[in-house]
Amino acid sequence: MATGEQIKALIKAHFENSSDRFATTALQVAAHEARQGHDTLAEQIRDIVQKSKPTSPNVSVIQFKREISDLIVCNNSENRLTDLIVPDPVKNRLKRILTEFKQQEKLRKFGLKNRRKILITGPPGTGKTLTASVLAGELHLPLMVVMMDKLLTKFMGETSARLRQIFDTIQDNMGVYLFDEFDTIGADRAYDNDVGEMRRVLNSFLMFIEQDNSSSIIIAATNNVRMLDQALFRRFDDVLQYERPTDTDIEHLIKNRVSSFIPASGLPQNLIIEAKGLSHAEIVQACDDALKDAVLQDKISISPDFLIHSVQEKKNAYDRVWGIDRG
């Protein structure tokens, strides 16, 4: 049964007409029941809450425990699947994650579970973080970003303790949880380190994610998939590999970004060739530079020459700084 504090919180939320707080407390009751081994009741409560929440919960009513309040940044997301430019096979797998989440009750009747533990790998700027935001926006869930720099501490055992608190929060507050730069804690245990602390942290994560039976979606994102410990992969329900955009992706990305500012003459013919090798994020930044130029000069369309210049500028800047070969 719910604790006394949870019952009081439910009653208070009801009489204060706070549906968001009521829903948050109900999910905490579900988490409490799950820990007591009452899985069926917990799932039924989660289903009722999910079906009665057509819009995103107000992040201001999510009350984190004081000791974890600086470890998670909570936001509402307005992003949708149409905002994400990825190859069709990847987009279809994301649609499958959304469909399974929305119809998880049907799956449970046959002893099946929806995909909700996702590992995303790929170069910087290819849409990994945006994917987490898109899933949150499509499912009307809060986006919870785990602050990896604050998670790690110099004190032995403290990082694992903080990690446990995060997974307790995942259980109590349904949302999309993003562990960005996941290789920080997911590196192969064969790598040398001074005291083996990171091995203990990884072991803790492996245990926590395997035991997790919440309704939240957990996303781990990394630029360095080769660094990850092999034991991690079987703990995730799906692994998505992102790459730099194809010619088709580049065209769609630019058209989506500049939209009504496309000149009557159309986009420059050599634009896609010039943008080849840039990441999604770099192309967006180049488009934004061209848009700002048009807005500040009171133009109704972007300058094709300036758009080409912006792409070349972005490409040259990164190449000079990092010595990147984009061939």
Image: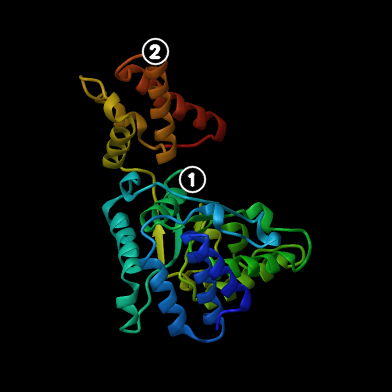
Q: Quadrant of residue 90?
A: bottom left
Indicate the amino acid at tag 1. Pro
| The C terminus: image quadrant | top left
- Helix, strand or loop for disc 1: loop
Q: Is residue 165 left or right of residue 92?
A: right
Q: Identify the residue under disc 1.
A: 124
Seen from the viewer's position, the closer of residues 237 and 25 is 25
* Numbered tag placed on residue 69 in the rendering: none
Q: Position of residue 2 (x, y in %)?
A: 56, 79
Q: Residue furthest left?
A: 265
Indicate the amino acid at tag 2. Gln
Q: Position of residue 241 (x, y in %)?
A: 40, 56
Q: Residue furthest front?
A: 15
Which residue is rendered at x = 41% and y = 78% of the image?
A: 44
Q: Is residue 206 above or below residue 272?
A: below
Say whether disc 1 or disc 2 marks the residue closer to the N-terminus. 1
Seen from the viewer's position, the closer of residues 307 and 4 is 4
**Colour scheme employed for the rendering of this structure:** rainbow
Q: Is residue 171 above or below residue 82?
A: below
Is residue 181 something that shows in the picture? no
Q: Identify the residue under disc 2.
A: 297
Which residue is rendered at x = 39% and y = 12% of the image?
A: 297
Q: What count of labels does the image hold?
A: 2
Q: Position of residue 50 (x, y in %)?
A: 39, 67
Callout 2 crowding tier (Cα within 10 Å): few <14, some 14–19, many ≥20: few
Q: Residue furthest top?
A: 297
Seen from the viewer's position, the closer of residues 59 and 13 is 13
Which residue is rendered at x = 68% and y = 54% of the image?
A: 150
Callout 1 crowding tier (Cα within 10 Å): few <14, some 14–19, many ≥20: some
Seen from the viewer's position, the closer of residues 17 and 51 is 17
Q: Is residue 158 left or right of residue 83?
A: right
Q: Position of residue 282 (x, y in %)?
A: 44, 35
